Image (cartoon, rainbow, N blue to C red):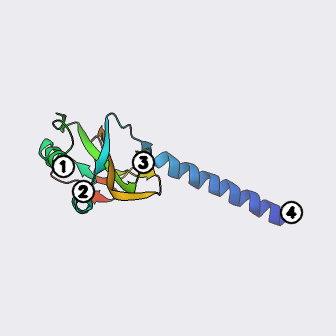
Amino acid sequence: MFRLTAVAVLAGCVWTLVSAEAVAEKKKVLITMKWNGSVADEELRKTAPECITSYKGLEKIWKAWKIKGTAPKLDFSEVMVVAVYSSGSRLSFADPTLDEKGNLQVVGFGTRDLRPGFRYVLGTVSKAGVVTVNGKKLPKE
């Protein structure tokens, strides 16, 4: 009985250390500005970017998605725009995290009530240390 208890305690300690190390490797990234909306044309979602790294890229989707006003002027040498999409009626960002390899993990959460078209949330984050977004290389735009 003592052996079984000792093994269980040791396994718990190892799990705690591994979990703490995994959490320590990822750093939360702050989303500083957000835009959200809905696009009626579902075909446009096929070309929707995970991130945007230039004003030209932002302006392109701003026009294609018929977002009111002009695309905001951002300092793309310092920030980039990340995006999440859903067919549900409501959508929001989960906290993005940056791992030690420079991968920015960006995910969203929302409702499961499917609607025509798609919903989007765009947000600005610092480019510092980012090499990939959701495992994909950064686009030129």
Q: Amino acid at mark 4?
A: Phe
Q: Amino acid at mark 2?
A: Ala
Seen as rendered, the residue at the extreme left is: 56
Splitting the image into 4 quarters, where does residue 12 fall?
bottom right
- Disc 4 target residue: 2
Q: Position of residue 38 (x, y in %)?
A: 30, 48
Q: Earlier in the sequence, mark 4 or mark 3?
A: 4
C-alpha gap between disc 4 and disc 1: 64 Å
Relative to the observer, which residue lies in front, 108 or 44? Answer: 44
Q: Crowding at label 1, few (<14), some or many (≥20) Cα neighbours within 10 Å?
A: some
Q: Position of residue 18 (x, y in %)?
A: 57, 55
- Disc 1 target residue: 61
| CB under 8 Å between discs 1 and 2 | yes
C-alpha gap between disc 2 and disc 4: 58 Å
Q: Amino acid at mark 3?
A: Arg
Q: Secondary structure beneath disc 3?
A: loop
C-alpha gap between disc 1 and disc 2: 8 Å
